Image (cartoon, helix red, strand yellow):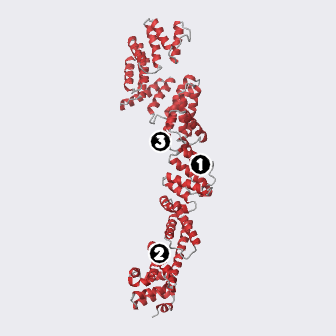
Amino acid sequence: MNTYGYFKQFPLCNISHLCARFFSVFGAPLRKITLLYGLFMQCSLYGAVAEWTALHPEEEAHLIALCKNPHYKTVRAHFYIPLATSYLLQGKDDEAHIILKKLIHIAAKNTSDEIVKAITTLFSEVDIYYKEQIAKADMLYAQHAFQEAAACFMKICTAAQKQIFFYSMSPTTKQALITHCTTGCMKSLFFAGNYPSCVEFLQRAHKNIEDGSFYYGVSLMATRSFTEARRAFDAYIHESKKGKFYTLAHLGAFLAAYRCEEYIAAKEILHVLPDALEQKEQACATLELVTLSDAKIQEYAAESLFRQFPEEEYIHKTPHAIAHLKELITAYPCAPIAIAAHVYIGNSLKDKQDASAMQEAVTHFQQALAIAPSGDLVDYLTKMLQEAHLNKAKTEITLVACSSSTIFLLESAEGSLKALLNTELHIQASYYLAVVYDLQEKAHLSRKQLENIVECQVKTNAVGAFFAKAYLMLGAYECAREHFTEALLLLAKAEAVRGSDQELLLQIWIATASCYKKMGQLDKAMTMLSRVINENIASSLRIQAMLHRAEIYELHGRRDLAIKQLEAAARKGGEWSVEAQKKLAQNYGYQHNTISP
């Protein structure tokens, strides 16, 4: 029976019913395939197979068995055609691709016009199928359904990689469509925020996609692969030569270098970055790099410049490092890292014995405090702000001795110190606040701060210089009130908790000697002062102790020893040497500057 001729007698709408009738009469597998072949040649490939698989889903397994049967090797193409189409309709692309590759091989070697025609018809339909998929992917992308679009584009790219679809097209047309799909897949993954998948896809394809290196770099940045991102941006800059994202690639290279702690390289890239990113609106508003505000870019740039020098050089006040910080605050005055820059510059000035230098230091500390944003800062900058408060107050306290604006300076210092009472620096803040109150002649408030420090020391059994200073200052208060027993106990406690600070030890001994002197116990006072003078450290307190010992010699009626002590002190140099010369002139008739060092 001529199956094909029999088949052509029926309209398309009755094909499925005809198939059902036909197979109720003819049961041989070969006859089934003959009918299928006629079905494919008669009508739309996909319409026919859709009808077939809807009625007989079990036939797919039967076709697979026929494909493997060696008896039908010569007509295997007839089995492959419906099987491949069935797979495509079910979305089983991997299985379909295997069969289609086999059909390509058969078409290349077979001379049968009938088979070649059937295979060509199949591939024409496959091309239509993938064109529909491209149109679907483009529509999803236009609707910003990026994840779904990415899945659709990825399916097409996989087929292209296996060289399955666009079989009937010219190489130029095929390559244009492949490029369109790979670009669509890249952008869909990128804008869906699926950066790991985008990186994985672009590792294979970015060199063949326009601007692929740029998207690859941004995706690597998003996955924190900063070293690889730097290479990708550098490659784009080298390849594109003023391309669409040329400026942004420089920004990406700068940020990647910054994240890799390549601060010198980051600084060099800054020189080629324009002041304004003119292309940011033209490029693409959703790119992560573009959404960085100008303020954020400046923040990264300033941090990169700050870290060009090791922080130890700022701490040790290295001149070229401090000069670099001055350039930084000029270029980026509002960047958060400028807080640290101002603090380090202030620290380099505050200890100079020059009122103008100290005033400049105060100005830098004030500028650091003025930069502080309303939001949270990183811990490092928070500590820098606390240091700015503390060092500003300490410098203002020092300036009190050489300034006519005593009231203003002390009020300013008081405000800064109160801001630190609930921080980790609360012990130091409380101590210097006590000093401020003492200078303001508010002894009751000063004692309250000192007692808070002592209470904390007793609770924690801690040691340290500021605990000792609190005991020392309380001891001085008690000595002034002539509560000598309490004063000596406090001074002994100060010595016990001072830690390893030798300079502070000499201060405690001098205060103890002063207490004994007021008590009239001059021998004990002389013993304490001798300990200070004989201590083997370089300290101006040893010269101060000589002046105190000269006073005790005078009280003992030993003017000759008092003069010798003052002469020895006068030869040492420094502020206490000047004081010794004054005493020699006032009490013993010496002319100023007659004692040579």
Front residue of 57 and 227: 227
Q: Tell me the quarter of the picture where residue 58 sits.
A: bottom left
Q: Secondary structure at mark 2?
A: helix
Q: In the displayed structure, would residue 140 be above or below residue 399?
A: below
Between the residue at mark 3 and the residue at mark 2, the CA separation in whole angstroms equals: 61 Å
Instruction: State the image coordinates of residue 585 (x, y, percent, origin top left).
Output: 54, 9
Q: Residue at x 56, y 31 (%)?
A: 361
- For mark 3, does the 10 Å Cα neighbourhood hold few (<14), some (14 to 19), or many (20 or more) residues? few
Q: Residue at x 51, y 15 (%)?
A: 577
Look at mark 3 in the image and give the residue it sits on.
Answer: 379
Q: Is residue 3 left or right of residue 591?
A: left
The numbered disc on residue 406 is none
Q: Give the residue at the far bottom of this rendering.
A: 1
Between the residue at mark 1 and the residue at mark 2, the CA separation in whole angstroms equals: 54 Å
Q: In the displayed structure, would residue 40 be above or below residue 543?
A: below
Look at mark 2 in the image and give the residue it sits on.
Answer: 101
Q: Looking at the figure, which quarter contains the N terminus?
A: bottom left
The numbered disc on residue 294 is 1
Identify residue type, mark 2.
Lys
Identify residue type, mark 3.
Asp
The answer to whether any part of residue 288 appears in the image is no
Q: Secondary structure at mark 3?
A: helix
Between the residue at mark 3 and the residue at mark 1, the CA separation in whole angstroms equals: 23 Å
Q: Secondary structure at mark 1?
A: helix
Q: Residue at x 51, y 57 (%)?
A: 219
- For mark 1, does the 10 Å Cα neighbourhood hold few (<14), some (14 to 19), or many (20 or more) residues? few
- For mark 2, does the 10 Å Cα neighbourhood hold few (<14), some (14 to 19), or many (20 or more) residues? some
Front residue of 398 and 558: 558
Mark toward the start of the polypeptide (1 vs 2): 2
